[in-house]
Amino acid sequence: MKFVDEYRDPAAARVLVARIRELAGEDSFKFMEVCGGHTHTIYRHGIEHVLPQNVELVHGPGCPVCVIPMGRVDDAIAVAETPGVIFTSFGDMMRVPGGHGNLLEAKARGADVRFVYSPLDALRIAVEHPDREVVFFAVGFETTAPSTAVTLLRARDADVRNFSVFCNHVTIVPPLKAILESPDLRLDGFLGPGHVSTVVGNHPYRFVPAQYGKPLVTAGFEPLDILQAIVMLLTQIREGRCQVENQYTRIVRDEGNPRALKMLAEVFELRPHFEWRGLGFISQSALKLRPELAPWDAELRFAVPGVRVADPKACQCGEVLKGVIKPWECKVFGTACTPETPIGTCMVSSEGACAAYYNFGRLHREAAVTLGRASA
Amino acid sequence: MTVTSARDGRESAVLERIEAFRRRRPRLTDEVVTLAHGAGGKASAALVDALFLDAFANEPLSELADGATIQVGTSRLAFSTDSFVVAPRTFPGGSIGHLAVHGTVNDLAMLGARPAWLSSAFVLEEGFPMAELRDIVADMASAAAAAEVAIVTGDTKVVNRGAADGMYVTTAGVGVIPDGRVLGPELVRPGDVVLVSGTIADHGMAVMLARGDLALEADIRSDTAPLGGLVADLLAAAPGTRWLRDPTRGGVGTVCNELAHSTELAVVLDERALPVAPAVTGACDLLGIDPLYVANEGKVVAVVPPDQADAALAAMRAHPFGRDAAVIGEIRSEPERIVVLLTSFGGTRIVDMLVGDPLPRIC
C-alpha cells in the first residue's frame, strides 16, 4: 500500500512537528478536530504524543454514532422487534445504548438485526426477502446521507415496497454553530471535516471565520494530513489571517459534489429540530424523508414510540462533544462508563472521543515519551 | 508550565483509578448469551472466569492456557479441545476440515507438546449434502496426515433441519510433552523478545471476504497450517523459549494482552515490524478493522530470551510456514499489564483487549 505509506511517513512527520513547535512557540493552542474519523486517526497513530504539549487537540461532535440520542435508539429497537422485520444497521450502531438496552441485546432476544456496510445491502436483502419488511437505520452526516439517498431513489424506481429507512441523518453546520455559541468555548481554530466536505464543499464553513473569528482548515484522515492542517492553522494565526482553507485538496473541492447535493435535496428535507446527544435540541440540524417518499419512511410505517429519554445525569458526553472537558475529566470515564458498559455514546464507537481515548490513549504521557525515545 | 503538570497529575490519577478498576475480576451481568461472549474479548473472559472457572475449578484449568497439561505417571500430556463453526465452510486456503485439525494440533504445539491423537465429533443438520461432508472429511484426513496425528475416535449426531447451521465439528487432542520442557508466562522477563512466525490477519480477512457480503475482492488466502513442525524447530534452535501462543480468534493483539496480564509486564510492539500482507492492509483499512485483532490459523507468537532471538528467527524463517517470521516487539517492565504499539508514524498507543466482535466503522 504505497498510497497509504506516503501519508504516514515518520520523517515527513518529524519535519511537520518541528514546524508546529516553531510556529506555536511559547503560546498554547487548542484546536478542535470536527470529525470522528480524525479522532480515530489521532489515537490510532498516537498523534497526541507526537505534538508539543502546548498544542492540544479537542475532539468535536463529528462522530455520527455519538450524537444519536437514547430515545432514537429505543425507537430503532421498537421497529427491530416488530414481527416480520429485518432491521439493518451499520456495525457500530449496534452497541449504542438506548433507554432499554441496545440493538445487539435486541438481536440476542430474537429480533432479526443484521449489520450491513451500505444501505444498498439492506435494499438487496429486501429484494431477496419480499415477504419481510426490511428497515435500514440511517445515521451519519452528509458523508453517508448520499448513499441513503441513492438507495431510496433505487427503491422508488424499482418500486420495492418492503423496504424503508429510519432516517437519523444530521448536518454538520448547526452543531458547529452550537459549539461556537457555547459560552465556555476556548478554541483557537478547527480541523474541518474531510469526508463531509467532499459532499458539501468548503463554502458552508465561511461563517466560522466571518462570524466567530476562528480559522478552519478542512483536513484529510491520514496522520500527515492532520499535522499539515495544524501547520496551516498556526500559519494563519501567525500571519494574522482568519479564513477557511483546504488541506484535503486531493479529495475535497470548494463547491463540493453538486450531484450528491442535488440528490440530497431530492430525497431529504430539514426537520424543524432534532435532539443531539449531549447538545440538546438544535433547530434545522437533521434530515427527514420528503413527503413524496413517505412509502419508504419507517417513521410513518411503524409505530415508533418517539419517547424522549434524558441523558444519564452522570454522563458528560455533552461537555466532551463541545470540547469543554477531555474524556478523562468525565466523572464516570473508565469506571462506570467503559467500552463494555458504555453510558454515553462517546464511549461506543471507536470514533467517539471517549472510546478512542480509552482504547488507544490511556497511557501516561511520560511513559509514551520514554517509549518513543527508547525506540528512536 | 505548572498548569500542564497539574493537568498531568490529575490525568494520571484518573488513569490509575481506571487501572485498579480493570484489575477487578470480570463480572458476568448479561441476562442472555450474546455473540460478544464468543468473540474472544472481554465478554468471553468474563464468561469463562465467572461461570466455567467457578464451576469446574481445578489446577490444570486454572492455567487458562490453550490446553491443559496433565501429569500421567512419569510423562506429561497436553490435552486440548476446540469447536469449529466457521461460515463459509470453505474459503481460499482451506476449509472447516483443515481448521478442525490445525486448531487442535496447534493448541497442543503451543504447550510444547508433540501432537499425537485427535478425536472428532460432528453435529450434522438433516439434509446436509453428503458430497460436501465427504470433502470436509477428506480435508481432515489430509490435514491429519500432514500434521502427523491420528484421528482415533469420534462421534456423530444428526439434528433436525434448522437446529444447526449445516454442520459443526469439535475436535479434542492429546500430545506428549518431552521431558524437561517448560513453557509459561511465569518464565517471561523484561528484555525478552517477541516474535511472530509470519504475516498476520490472513485467515480472518480471507473468511470475511469469502462471506461475499462486502462486495470486496482481494487475493487473500487463509494461513491455516499445522505448527507442530515449526514449533519443534523453534524449540530446538531456541531452547530457552519462554512462552508460545497461536493468535487465533482475537488475533495478535488479544494474545499479547493475555501475556501482559498474566506476566504483569508490558508488551511493546513495533508497528513497522508487524508483517502484514499488502492486500490485507488494504482490506483492513477499507473496513476500519485493525489487523492486530484479526484471526490467524497458522501462526505462533513466541517470547524468547534476547540472546536466542536470532536463532529463533532463523529457525522460523527456515521452515515453510515461517518464511515471513519477524521480531515484532519486546517485553518491558513498564507500563505494567499493558500492550503498547509504537506506531510506524512515530507515536504510541495502547492495544487493548477487544470488546465483542470487531464492528466495522461507518466512515
Image: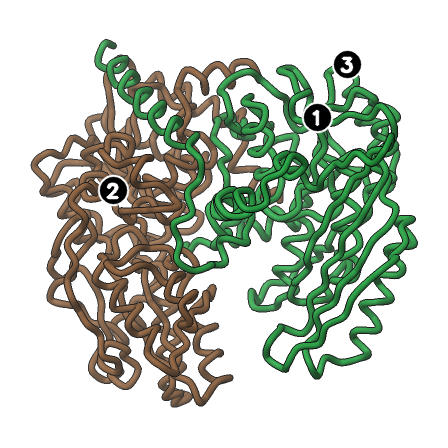
Chain colours: A brown, B green
Chain letter belonging to callout 3 = B
Image quadrant occupied by the N terminus of chain A:
top right
Height in image: B194 above or below A211? above
The residue at 30%/66% (across/down) is: A261
Give the image location of residue B331, x and y in percent. Answer: 61, 21
Q: CA distance from mark 2 to mark 1?
A: 51 Å
The residue closer to the viewer here, B138 or A329, is B138
Give the mark toward the camera: 2 or 1: 1
Residues at marks 2 and 1 touching, judged by CB atoms closer than 8 Å: no
Chain letter belonging to callout 2 = A
Q: Is residue B74 left or right of residue B304?
A: right
Residue A297: quarter of image: bottom left
The residue at 87%/66% (across/down) is: B138
What is the crowding at mark 2: few (fewer than 14 residues within 10 Å), some, or many (at least 20)? many
Evaluate whether label 2 is on the same chain as label 1.
no
Residue marked by disc 3: B307
Q: CA distance from mark 3 to mark 2?
A: 56 Å
- Would residue A262 be seen by someone viewing this image from the given angle? no
Height in image: B355 above or below A150? above
Q: Is residue A355 left or right of residue A216?
A: right
Kindly identify which numbered label has been placed on residue A306.
none
- Kind of residue sitting beneath label 2: Val
- Kind of residue sitting beneath label 1: Val
Residue marked by disc 1: B303
- Would residue A229 be seen by someone viewing this image from the given angle? yes
The residue at 35%/25% (across/down) is: B15
Give the mark toward the camera: 3 or 2: 3
The residue closer to the viewer here, B323 or B81, is B81
Residue marked by disc 2: A244
Give the image location of residue B111, x and y in percent. Answer: 76, 35
- Identify the secondary structure beneath mark 1: strand
